[in-house]
Image (tube, rainbow, N blue to C red):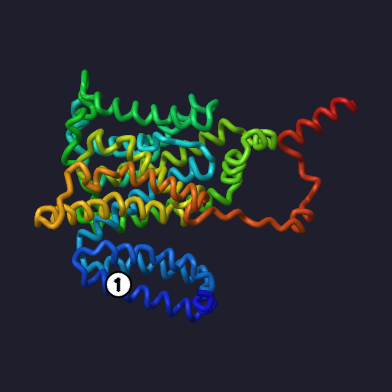
Amino acid sequence: MEKVKALLSNQSAQYGFISIYLLVASLWLHFAAKSIIAFLMLLFSFLVLYYSNKIPTKTRIIVGVLIFTILLPFASGGNQYYMEVASNVGIYIAMALGLNIVVGFAGLLDLGYVAFFAAGAYSYAIFATAQANNFMPAFMQFPLGGEWFWPFLLIGLLVAAIFGILLGLPVLKVKGDYLAIVTLGFGEIIRIVFNNLDKPINITNGPRGIPAVAQPELFGFQFNTSTHYYYLVLIVIAVIIIANKRLENSRLGRAWIAIREDELAAQAMGIPLVRTKLLAFATGASFAGIVGVIFAAKQTFIDPTSFILMQSISILVMVILGGNGSVPGVIVGGAIITVLNVSVLQEISEWLQQLSMSGVINIPNELDPSKFQRLIFGLILISIAIFRPMGIIPAKRPEIDLDKVKELDQTLPQTGILAQVEAQQGRKSS
């Protein structure tokens, strides 16, 4: 084992290993009509790239971009099954990255995150169908065309951000378990409101849902296949990853991390708790709003059952499994849980049903693996808590050069509690 590690620590060996890995995964995926293992192998190639630390970072980023923009669609050979799974994985990774800001960076346990997803989805679905004619003035005719999808990405962002601020305002004085309970209640309230908002004025069409949502159009080109949505989701994920990395290393990101580590100490250092927490809720919610708009357009049908509590728990499990505050970790966690949810459990269930129908085994319907989603999530969380408490890829803290800190300008004005102490000393001396 030590010899293998020593061999893979060489840059040339890492290049060779990645080349062989990608070749095997691509060929397997291309020739297999429906192999989830081959799909996972190519999907997790970015994990192989992440740990290839002898290869320059820029090279790894370029190779990663080429894998997901060219190699994966080409290797799948236009197979819509693979592209459907890939676009669903992308949607949930984008949501997990949004929740990572609230839970991972700011340490605010949010169990109602799916409410922001629902707000974005309904904001587009209502106006992209004839549903809006029920409450809008008569001179305005709906549905809007697919070209309105693009402005609604921004509208969905704003609507979800407003919902985030509305949630954040009343819960600022609670934290920990109490915050989790309040946000859980908020998520359920939003779902119930959408479920009952069909009278006295029919806005959401209640439990019947909203069908025939217009699909996006760009210069006459309609987005109507899984491959189209795959590329759309890739662009959104790229934007969210850049936003995550920029926020993490910004003054605001450091303030979120300070609140997560010790709220009292952060307040003593002059960090405004109310504004900083509200920004965390609004920023995280806005990403969910954008993804909600894409989800509504892709599915062309939404109803309140698409936004149940289990969705919030799934997204939270993605963040905890990957690593709180770790962008690559959250991507890994999102991919594992989504593939497990949308494909692996169903594949196992169908395989067992075939065995049962052929008389090889006799498994009762109550033991169908697809019905054990909550049990599997629980086992995953317990295993992670025991063996990897910081997640699969823990968040890295930036190393601070103390020599450079000592060279900083000490004449800069103090902030926070130090500024108050200086002010008091100044009043006493005067």
**Number of numbered callouts drawn:** 1
Front-most of 172 and 164? Answer: 172
At a point 39% along the width and 34% down the height, the residue shown is: 112
Q: Which residue is mark 1?
A: 26
Compared across the picture, whether 222 is left or right of 21 comes to: left
Q: Which residue sits furthest right? A: 429
Residue drawn where x is 67% and y is 36% of the image? 265
Task: Name the residue at the top extreme.
Answer: 200
Residue 406's place in the image compared with 311, above or below, is below
Farthest-out residue, left: 358
Q: Would you place residue 157 above or below residue 173 in this image?
A: below
Where in the figure is residue 105, as x and y percent of width and height?
A: 53, 44
Q: Nearer the viewer, residue 234 or 332?
A: 332
Within 10 angstroms of label 1, few (less than 14), some, or many (20 or more) residues? many
Give the image location of residue 6, x and y in percent: 54, 77
- The quadrant in which the C terminus is found is top right
The quarter holding residue 72 reads bottom left
Whether residue 303 is visible, yes or no, is yes
Could you say which quadrant of the image residue 148 lies in?
Answer: top left
Residue 127 in sight = no
x, y percentage for residue 322?
A: 45, 52
Between 13 and 287, the residue placed more toward the observer is 13
Mark 1: secondary structure:
helix
Residue 312, horizontal then vertical, whole percent = 37, 39
**Amino acid found under the numbered disc labelled 1:** Ser
